[in-house]
Image: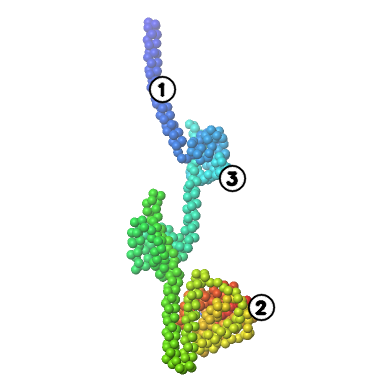
């Protein structure tokens, strides 16, 4: 009985063991499956780690590197073999080495470090710009055992950033307004020159429509320009007018190009506006000047013709002929001056002017010019004061032009009957030539501008006096080329004195 009980117990025991064995087999299978899955996962992770462009490095709490991927090799130049077991400090430039302990402190507090931009050292000793993301690595018990670092090489971004900064600096320092806008004509950028030219600040204009700058009678230009750009045609040097904040019009030359994204899609437009107000003003004045010269030449030419015809009428009357020819000569001189001024302006513009340095008698020249001025107009008394003869160095022909201009201005801007005093005074090694009138005078503000080309004082008194604002420009330029300077002292209503010096011929 006991024996059979024992047998039964044994059988039960075997049965139990079989059950356990079967159970453990399924457990083994389950564990195997889990292992397989884990292996697969780790293979996937490894291949990700090896194929990513970012360097992935892990290290223990003593800063010793425990893993190193392919991209880390590419970025730093060290192989996995060289780096595993080495200190991470090998990659950190000396002045940044205290960063490491700071990172550790942060991570111990449970903070991740993301997109931290810094520099690291390559094997070849060069620095590389990187962006770091650092996360803690914990063991199964949740204790911090190390760090894993993702390192991104941001050299290209840095280069692009610095190019961007340089471009931005160029845009800001440009003399031309540079404005960008989207296809709805809304302004998206506005540089300093745009503020200077149009009077609006960037904060006033960004987000506003470009139409704010377009005069109402030119509004149809915008859709035409847009249509052209959509066809891919750049708009270059398109001369038009735009509106300033203060409501005044400004002449501009526009160059408009499409702004494309990296894929070549047009995402907006950039406009470069050059202020050509001054250029158009000068052009306008030049045109006026040309028609003025032609007209002015016609007047003495007509008189000349009539004096000559008169002389021909009385071939026997010597007195009459002499008078007619004298008058004819005055007219030819007038024409000569006009042509000379005209030619001089264009020669000056082209830089073709040279100054001769020859000795000549300035007193004699002054006297000749006074005589010519007296012939040209009998309405003023022109007198000379000073020494009888002074030999100076310079370009006699050009100084003649200066004297003629200054004396004729003194006549033009003085009331009839006024007296003009021309003097030559010796001062040290120079002669100071001055032309003094008691005419209308010039305000301080106009004195500052009157040596500019085409500048004329415009007021009630000068309104009917003909002129084109080139005499003083030519005279001061000629004197500058002589290393001298045309100067003026003047008082409104009292008169003016223009003076300059020339070196003595020693
Ligand atoms: P223009 O006489 O042909 O206008 P200028 O260059 O000779 O040109 O002179 C420029 C301006 O300076 C003149 O328009 C005039 O207003 C002023 N100006 C020149 N000379 C005198 C003067 N002697 N007295 C008063 N104003 C003068």
Q: In this view, does 235 lie to the left or right of 80?
A: left
- Identified at 57% across, 87% down, the residue is 383
**321, 107: nearer the viewer:** 321
- The kind of secondary structure element at disc 3 is helix
Q: Is residue 14 left or right of residue 435?
A: left
The reply to whether discs 3 and 1 touch (Cβ–Cβ < 8 Å) is: no
What element does badge 1 sit on?
helix
| Residue at which label 1 appears | 28
Residue 12 lies, in percent from the top left, at 38, 13
| Percent coordinates x, y for residue 293 in the rendering | 44, 78
- Colour scheme in use: rainbow
The residue wearing badge 2 is 428
Instruction: Return the residue at label 3.
Output: 95
- Check the image and report above or below for 412 versus 8: below
Element at badge 2?
A: loop
Tell me if 404 is positioned left or right of 228 in this view. right
Which residue is pictured at 51% across the width and 87% down the height?
375
Q: Quadrant of the image for the N terminus?
A: top left
| Label 2, label 3: how far apart the Cα atoms are | 67 Å
């Amino acid at each position: 009985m006991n024996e059979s009980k024992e047998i039964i117990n044994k059988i039960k025991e075997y049965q139990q063991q079989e059950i356990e064995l079967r159970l453990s087999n399924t457990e083994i299978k389950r564990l195997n499956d889990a292992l397989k899955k884990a292996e697969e996962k780790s293979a996937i992770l490894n291949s990700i780690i090896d194929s990513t462009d970012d360097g992935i490095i892990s290290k223990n709490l003593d800063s010793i590197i425990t893993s190193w991927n392919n991209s880390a090799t590419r970025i730093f130049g060290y192989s996995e073999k060289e780096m595993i077991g080495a200190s991470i400090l090998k990659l950190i430039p000396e002045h940044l080495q205290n960063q490491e302990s700071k990172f550790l402190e942060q991570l111990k507090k449970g903070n991740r470090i993301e997109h931290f931009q810094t520099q690291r050292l390559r094997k070849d000793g060069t620095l590389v710009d990187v962006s770091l993301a650092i996360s803690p690595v914990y063991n199964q018990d949740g204790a911090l055992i190390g760090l894993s670092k993702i390192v991104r090489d941001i050299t290209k971004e840095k280069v692009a950033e610095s190019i961007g900064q340089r471009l931005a600096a160029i845009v800001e320092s440009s003399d031309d307004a540079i404005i960008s806008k989207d296809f709805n004509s809304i302004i998206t950028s506005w540089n300093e020159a745009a503020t200077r030219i149009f009077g609006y600040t960037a904060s006033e204009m960004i987000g506003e429509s470009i139409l704010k700058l377009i005069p109402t009678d030119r509004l149809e230009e915008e859709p035409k320009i847009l249509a052209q750009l959509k066809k891919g045609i750049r708009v270059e040097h398109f001369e038009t007018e735009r509106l300033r904040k203060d409501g005044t019009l400004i002449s501009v030359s526009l160059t408009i190009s499409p702004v494309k994204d990296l894929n070549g899609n047009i995402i907006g437009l950039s406009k470069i506006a050059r202020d050509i107000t001054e250029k158009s003003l000068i052009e306008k004045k030049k045109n006026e000047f040309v028609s003025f010269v032609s007209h002015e030449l016609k007047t003495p030419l007509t008189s000349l013709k009539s004096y000559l015809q008169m002389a021909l009428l009385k071939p026997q009357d010597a007195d009459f002929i002499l008078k007619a020819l004298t008058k004819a000569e005055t007219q030819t001189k007038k024409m000569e001056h006009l042509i000379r001024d005209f030619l001089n302006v264009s020669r000056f513009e082209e830089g073709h002017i040279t100054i001769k340095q020859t000795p000549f008698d300035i007193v004699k020249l002054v006297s000749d010019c006074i005589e010519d001025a007296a012939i040209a107009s009998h309405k003023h008394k022109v007198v000379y004061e000073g020494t009888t003869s002074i030999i100076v160095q310079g370009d006699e022909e050009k100084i003649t032009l200066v004297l003629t201009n200054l004396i004729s201005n003194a006549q033009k801007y003085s009331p009839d009957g006024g007296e003009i005093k021309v003097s030559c005074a010796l001062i040290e090694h120079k002669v100071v030539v001055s032309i003094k009138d008691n005419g209308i005078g010039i305000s301080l503000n106009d004195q500052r501008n009157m040596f500019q080309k085409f500048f004329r004082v415009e007021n009630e008194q000068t309104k009917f006096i003909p002129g084109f604002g080139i005499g003083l420009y030519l005279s001061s330029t000629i004197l500058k080329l002589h290393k001298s300077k045309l100067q003026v002292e003047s008082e409104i209503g009292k008169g003016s004195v223009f003076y300059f010096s020339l070196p003595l011929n020693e």
